[in-house]
Image (cartoon, rainbow, N blue to C red):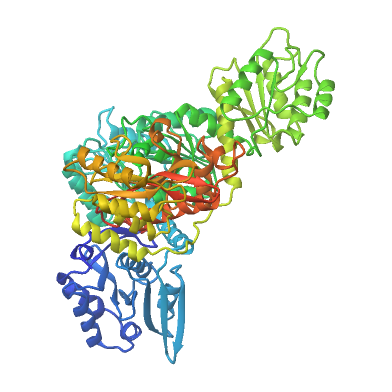
Amino acid sequence: MTHDEHSRPPVHALLADGTTTCIRAVVPDDHVRLQRLYEEMSPESLRLRFFAASRRSAAQAVDRACATPRPGHRTLLAETKGQIIGVAEYERTEESGTAEISLAVAEGLHHRGIGTLLLEHLVSAARADGVTAFTADALAENHEVLKVFADLGLRTARRFDGPEVRCVIQLAQDETYLTAVEARGGAADVASLEPLLRPRSIAVVGAGRKAGSVGRAVLRNLRTGGFPRRLFAVNPSVSSLMSVPAYPSIAALPLVPDLVVLAVPAPALPATAEECGKAGVHALVVVTAGLDAGQAAALLGTCRAYGMRLVGPNCLGLANTDKALKLDSTFGARHPRRGTAGVAVQSGGVGIALLDGLSRLGLGISSFVSLGDKYDVSGNDLLQWWERDGVTDLALLHLESFGNPRAFSRTARRVSRRMPLLTVDAGRTEAGRRAAASHTAASATRTMTRQALFSQAGITATRTIGELLEAAALLHSQPAPAGRRVAVVTNAGGVGVLTADACAEAGLTLPPLPADLIDALRVDLPEGAAIGNPVDATAVVTEQQLKNCVDRLVRHSAIDAVLVVLVPTAVAAATGDDLVRALAHAPGRRSRTVAAVCLEQALPVRLLPVKGGESVPSYADPAAAARALSHAVRRAEWLARPPGTVPDLTGVETRHAHAVAETWLAGHPEGGWLDPRTCAELLACYGIPQLPWAWAETEDEAVTAAERLRGPDGRVVMKAHWPGLLHKSEQRAIHLDLQGDSQVRAAFRDFETRFAGLLTGAVVQPLAERGTELFAGVVQDEVFGPLVLFGLGGTATELLADHAARLAPLTDLDVHDLITAPRCAPLLFGHGGSGPVDLEGLEQLLHRLSRMACDLPHLAEADLNPVLARPGGITALDVRVRLQRRAAHDPYLRRLR
């Protein structure tokens, strides 16, 4: 274990009650305070910890924990406001991969999740150190510690021996463990947000007497919004502001507020936050903008030191429309409408637009949080709040950045199964691509990465705020469509054609209507109606006729959704409103997705109230309706799929792979592209099939290699190599179809001549059989983690850009999506009569690539191009791997940003 592993920076995390603690490594200076932890324990607690009420054992434990760092040993402590509240340690044993653990929690602080949180961090550190199992001895009567071990979510075995029990805890991270960690983290997150979103008291600092100040606007909204609990202003110049009692400082308030809104100048912010922390405030909303780096660090440091959750800075504020709370601590021009949509945004402008749009639709919000610069509270926190608040049934996000995308993805996948989760895909046009030369990195645009995250998590991603509101209206008001089959009904044939085009462009289908349905519709509709799909009911259709038509369509098994497109006419027997009302009275409407297009309406989208308190979305443009329907279809398809599983792989040698990477990086601390030998050795650790090859540094070695590797046709391939060479075809650093020793010698001499001073050797391979050339790769995104790409390969892979991408780890469904998404997919399934390629082998290659990317934090890029796919197998013909030293990061470890 290196010194760096012992000196990892402290992290803050939430306990079960929502309070904050700091988890860090023990240092020698902790000796006195750690000793106090044991001194304050009762004799009974000491007996349960040390099997005897022994102060001497406690002193020895303190000495051991505070000793100079040594290999195979680690001690972590939990610290809150300078007090050590828990300690956990492990010590490697003689048994390979095993470490003995111990755990102690401060007297009187049990049942707050301290021990569990420490063990989660200890497990993460031990895995990084190569430990695969913990052992622990406990008294059989120590039910609390045995329950902590059992509830971790890790596979635990117990062996009783008289009054003692020996526990063996396997550290392998699986879905059961991650689910348990998520459940604990979610409960702690929600508890920590209570002072923000359900405060018992609020103070506003920075509200002035002059109109126009942000602080005054926040105070006004809190007062006029009807916040029923204690409300204060902090202003040393007055005793009252807008009928709200004012005090000169936080310390002068008659009670400590749960929530403080700070609207003070940036230079005053650190001191004001410090004052709040010292007073015992639980949460801050900082609307102040323009913080410099020092002010930002001071603000966040103060919030962490005193355990305050923070929204902002540079934010619009937050709101909770609960009728018993009526909390509006924003400086918006209007109070948010009460409803059931949860909204979290980074941009205040986007937040105002969404609040106005949701109010106009009649949806309203359950809670709204403007995250601003997002120093602390994030979209992930809000998802977990909405999941548990009992009100929210629709979640809308606008996130410009992701602090922990893999944790966000897991949370979003879970929440998306409970309610629609929509986002505006911000930052799609980020200029340029990542500064890397490989095919994989050049293909991995930020747009592709974000789209992979949204697709895997079941998030409905829209391009604009308007499109988001259009989709939200339909998803909130209508049942999910069972498929993509849409019937269009209109009173104007030309508009019906435009709508049909819009549906097709959105990926929907307009199937021919069955004969029985056509016959029934002929009876229902006026003479002259065109009974196809679209159904042209003509301009003279009546309300009753339209109702009968829609009812027949929504009841028929051949139709999944009905889109009714209406145009006002002077010859209609019914007005436009009458025709719209026909939708409400169609008895079968609730069984299918129904939407309307009313070309004369002024608003882009509105919800038409129908009987029973329900509504039907109405759009001003057929394309908008088709887009919304398409989003609903994709969500329904995602919901219909099982979650997917990450399969167990055989023949994976993770430990050896780590050793290969560490050995290479020891000789190349700056990182870089692996040589062919190391590259092949690393891929072999994961069972990724490669074409046989040999390394040659001389002409004679090339001839010998060719003789050994020649296939039945006697031909070989020779590829030049030197450090940094990526695109061999562009450099003409490859010779194909070499036959006989003379051609092999000539090829090697050509490399020596043209690449003098660069060439370090050549790779000799048999000429591969014919097959489909594919491309598979991994790139380690600094924010999103490893991204696996797949598509058409060969020298034109970047030009054709026929790729799909998914974030690792890949489930079986992710792999299926990767294989079927590219345009070249039909080639893999036997298009043209050639028969399908080895699809199982292709799935295995992608799973093994994903596993390698997740196992090795130093893996920056892997480029397999081409991968030859044939009915008889899958083989990587050319492979490039780049390593870059970076700290291991556990994306699922509980910690604050």
Residue located farthest toward the top when viewing the structure as drawn: 570
- List x then y, in percent, for residue 70: 20, 73
Question: In this picture, is 547 found above or below 692?
Answer: above
- List x then y, in percent, for residue 159: 45, 85
Q: Residue at x 40, y 55 (%)?
A: 189
Nearest the viewer among 734 and 183 is: 734
- Tell me the quarter of the image containing the N terminus: bottom left
Q: Residue at x 69, y 14 (%)?
A: 493
Residue 757 shown left or right of residue 97 in the figure: left
State which quadrant residue 535 falls in: top right
- List x then y, in percent, for residue 351: 40, 33
Residue 486 shown left or right of residue 806 in the figure: right
Residue 688 shown left or right of residue 763 in the figure: right
Residue 616 shown left or right of residue 840 in the figure: right
- List x then y, in percent, for residue 797: 41, 35
Residue 173 seen from this side: yes
Question: In this picture, is 366 found above or below 102?
Answer: above
Nearest the viewer among 147 and 843 is: 843
Q: Residue at x 38, y 44 (%)?
A: 739
